[in-house]
Image (cartoon, rainbow, N blue to C red):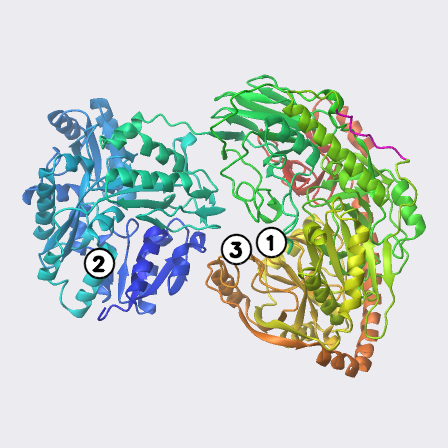
Amino acid sequence: MEKLKTLLVANRGEIAVRICKTAKKLNIKTIAIYSEADAASQHVRDADEAVQLSGSNATAYTDEDTILQIAKERKADAIIPGNGFLSENAHFARLVEEAGIVWVGPSPASIKAFGVKHVARDLAEKANVPIVPGTKGLVEDEEAAVKASGDIGFPVMLKATGGGGGMGLITCNNVDEVREGFKMVQSRGKTLFKNPGVFIEAFYLASHHIEVQVFGNGRGQAIQFGERECSIQWRHQKVIEECPSPFVEKHPELRQKLGNSAVRLAESIKYGSAGTIEYLVEHGVTELCYDVNLVELMLRQADAQLVGKGGLDGNELKKMQSTKPSGAAIEARIYAENPLKDYAPSPGLLQKVEWKDVPGGRIDTWVFSGSRVTPHYDPLIAKAMVHRHSRNEAIDGLKRVLTESSVCGPPTNLEFLAEIMDNPNFKSGDTMTNFLQSIKYVSHAIDVISAGAYTLIQDLPGRPSVGKGIPHSGPMDPLAFQIANMLVGNPRGKEGLEITLSGPELRFVGPAVVALCGAPMETLLDGKEFPMWTRVKIKAGQRLKIGKTTGGGCRSYLAVYGGFPAVAKYFGSKSTLPLVAIGGYQGRALASGDLLQIVSALPDNFEPTCLPERHHPTYGSRWEIKAMVGPHDEGYFLPEDIEMIYNTEWKISHNASRSGIRLIGPVPKWAREDGGEGGAHPSNLIEYGYPLGTLNWTGDDPCIFPVDAPNFGGFVSSTTIIRAEWWKLGQVKAGNTLKYVRAGLSDALKKRRIVEKFLDGIEHGVRSGGKFDKVERLQACHVDFHEGDIGKAVIWEREANGNVPAVRYRQGGDDHLIVEYGHESFDLNYRCRVTALEKALGSPSTPANIKASLLNTVGCCTTLLLYYDGFKLFRKDLVSHLQLLEFQLGDLRNSKVPTRLFKLPITFESKAQTKATERYMTNQRPHAPYLPDNLAFVAKNNAFTPEQLKRIYLTGQFMAVVVGFFCGNTVSLPVNPRQRMSCPKLNPSRVFTPEGTVSWDGSCMSIYPVDSPGGYQMTGRTVPCWDYYGYKKGFSADRPWLFRDFDILTYYQVSEKEMDGLLDRFRAGKYEFEYHDVEFDMGVHNRLLRETMEGVNEIRKKQAIAQEEMIKAEKESLERWRKEKAGGQVDESTVDKLLQDPNVLSVEASVDANVWKVEVRDGDEIKKGTVIALLEAMKLEIVMLVKPGGTVQAGGHLALLRKA
């Protein structure tokens, strides 16, 4: 290139990616433009520079003034429009040229000439190009249209002269349709193209659509690159393209005639650049068969114009003329569209995109794993092409691409395209424009008519070994889940549907074998009762409607033979975690309109199998669950507190979900006054890894942690449910009661063997044709379950010895063990030891049985949680090995740790955080010492001013001591002890925190990686530290989290506006984190601790005084809030009295729920469809009614309505 150095790409999608790729090859700098919806698109990352467009997503790419201004500001030499959007806009092309910028495409005059279709017909006729019979010029009114149609002969096409791409086109078969159609086309033309002109052409129901690729130099010379066949279309949009045309191959004399006519037409108007009559920018199949890069030719043409030559040299251009194509190429256009909805666009998240690589293959695409198809644009995902020596070879290659590629997310037409490849007419090359009407395509899928309350895809074992804030996941009730899979003939862990409270209505487009197991639910198949715990074969077209639960329990599981093959795996599992949009079907619960692909091949010999009722688990409303002594039962709770836990019949709160099951009951008296360095409340603790099944105390509120719980936190844990009883956590529901039953480790393992034996018996019974007589009934719970000593919280400990700290091992159920150093103080020496122990466990010298059974570890500042398979590894063997490692570690106080030092932006102003606080004050707690300004509270709690606190952020270094919670949340400790602070968590925690929030709790700073719940005090905002699919800079697919243990974080201040810009760059994948490698010297750090000890003690005394005042203020506020909540409730006797009036109606809650938002006021008129209130229960949002911040029980009165 002589002068073309900078190119603005005025488009999106695969064509923008294609242009950027070619420009890079030619050393041309590219500037991408993108809408907010396209921030994460591939072309944004591929370009050298990217600029976000203002305005709406729908109109951003046609905003002429903005795009031209961007080109001027960034000194672009040329603008290339691609296809669609501005490519046929003669006005914009003229503006570009007037600005002294080269327009890479046909001249404004050419665009105008061919953009007005009736003028293009005249030009073609003058150039002696064959045209379809039609009107000369425009038709002025209905009567003229009727007469012209009669002269041409029905059927006819009425076309908007300014239209294109099938828009503004109607087919008419009679006079009445012409009269009606004329008005419609005229209106569309005026609205869409600002041109009401209409002309008419003959319509050929069955014809070949063939077009010729031309390239002109704008100086009167042009060449052609042969023909393409685009006969296979849907709604006038091309689906399959081929080069050469199979039809022309059978009539070779046509090739020269078509080519010569196209060249004459192009040369007659001095056409410049590449195109066809439709002015398409490029066609891959032509490029493959003629070994030409049309985009490169266009850019070379633009460069020649910049130099002043007017275009490419005519002689050089003519030398490129070929007489025939080389081999055959076929292109299939892959769309995100739902074949069951008449191929309507189907936007959504593409969780996995992997293209099959075949000889001669080429994929033009803009998508990748993690990209999102938006509803604003064409749902084209990719153009898949294969070029081979023969057409048959190209068909075979393309079939492999279509069937062996993996595009998981919303429905696509991949399976439909693959069927075309197998069609005899297509294989013979005998396809016309009505070809697709003859295809009787049937999808092998389940159509989700309605989704139910909360329907998720889950599998076993989920993601137990990932960690770093990616929860365990999997079915809440693994017992019913596995039985359902066994009944249909699946492996026990195969993905299935978890249905909560009420189920979906599903239309089976293809046949399937299914089983529904779990809590009893109203279930109908085509209106007839459907049996649960039974293998059933469903025919294509049948509907399965799963209604509400009819008894105890809240979850059922629908297993489908073969599972859901089109659902992507995330870290090896298809389980859904909607809380942070991980896994399953687009990272969320199912919704109406979703399409679940199923397998087409079913077992040959189907035999219905039913599990006898005596083997069904019992689902009641009063649950007894076996539990072991928890990690903090001793020293944190009084003995009477522990007795209270076991003696209480706890009520299940409406806040019972996959991430936490809150209990309602007595409050502990606690064995200590506060949480020391962990926080002000006695439940606070220095962060540690949470065992699954544990009873975690967030303040005075107990919460059981099931499979989607965070993997660490700073609240104490008591009583821990044994693994064999985890399934019960999936069936307890709001309003039920729960009573703990004591169990020891041996009891837990014994019960586990019983459960495994039961499942093995069921599986054997299914395989043997339904013989379950030898299967023992699953043992029911009884109070005196445990045998002998139930054990202690601490199972081994050793006191400190010189520079080697104290260590103790705490049990966490039958699968977890916590190694704890020191005496609950933040000390980086402990974190260094945790890191060394974690590394030693992964060393080659670790015994094979421990390596095989150790599933995951969670390292925190003072602790290491070990998650292991207690069924395969004896705890005593694990403890013995840990003791050996302890003696080997020795003194680490002078060790040096390789790490990284980060420089991060921070803003102390955030509208998103302000809104989160307002939401908290409206829906959760209206007043507290930390409201409305968290930062001011943290400062005051530590005897600082807000400015002093900000100064700590801007001058301090923060050591990452744990990465996890949810999605790589990073907790850091100030390296300098003089900058350390303490503050309590919010009580209760927020239900929403904006991504990138910099927060404080206890003695640590934390960065929230994604929008999520949380209890840390919000003090600022930075760039998030998480990327789901690892495509952004600094991340990878196997490390979607940014930070590592011992990373050092520093901050520099930016304004809120600057931070918004950085967040835009981060979302676009253009932000680069600043860091460099360093070495952290523990010896130097320990010297700092000694030298500053006296000054630090003085700081702590001042902080203690301030914190005592804040604790007092918090107690007063909490007491006042609780009284306000109690006083704000309507007296039940008043309600009862009102209900005696026959004109008063009650609106009742369907479940125990949290009142999120009230949409009506006293005296409002209520009509059909009026939303009274929004309720939230088990993380389900229910439209209903009441007072924000309150709660309501199932059947409780939400509102009283008086008849008008």
Disc 2 and disc 1: Cα gap in Å? 45 Å
Residue depicted at 70% across the width and 56% down the height: 857
Secondary structure state at the residue bearing disc 3: loop
Tag 1 secondary structure = loop
- In 3D space, how far apart are the residues under numbered discs 3 and 2 (Cα atoms)? 36 Å
Disc 3 marks which amino acid?
Ala
Choose between 862 and 180: the one closer to the eye.
862
Label 1, label 3: how far apart the Cα atoms are: 20 Å
Magenta stretch: helix, strand or loop mostly: loop
Which residue is at a point 38% across and 28% down the rendered structure image? Answer: 441
Q: What's the residue type where badge 2 is placed?
A: Met
State the mark number for residue 1011: 1
The x, y position of residue 1071, in whole percent, is 48, 65
Q: Nearer the viewer, residue 711 or 830?
A: 830
Q: Is residue 116 visible?
A: yes
Amino acid at the residue labelled 1: Asp
The image shows residue 719 at horizontal and vertical percentages of 83, 47
Q: Earlier in the sequence, mark 1 or mark 3?
A: 1
Instruction: Find disc 3 in the rendering and name its residue.
Output: 1037
Residue interval drawn in magenta: 775-783
Report if residue 699 is visible in the image: no
Label 1 environment density (alpha carbons within 10 Å; few <14, some 14–19, many ≥20):
some
Question: Residue 298, labelled with which disc?
Answer: 2
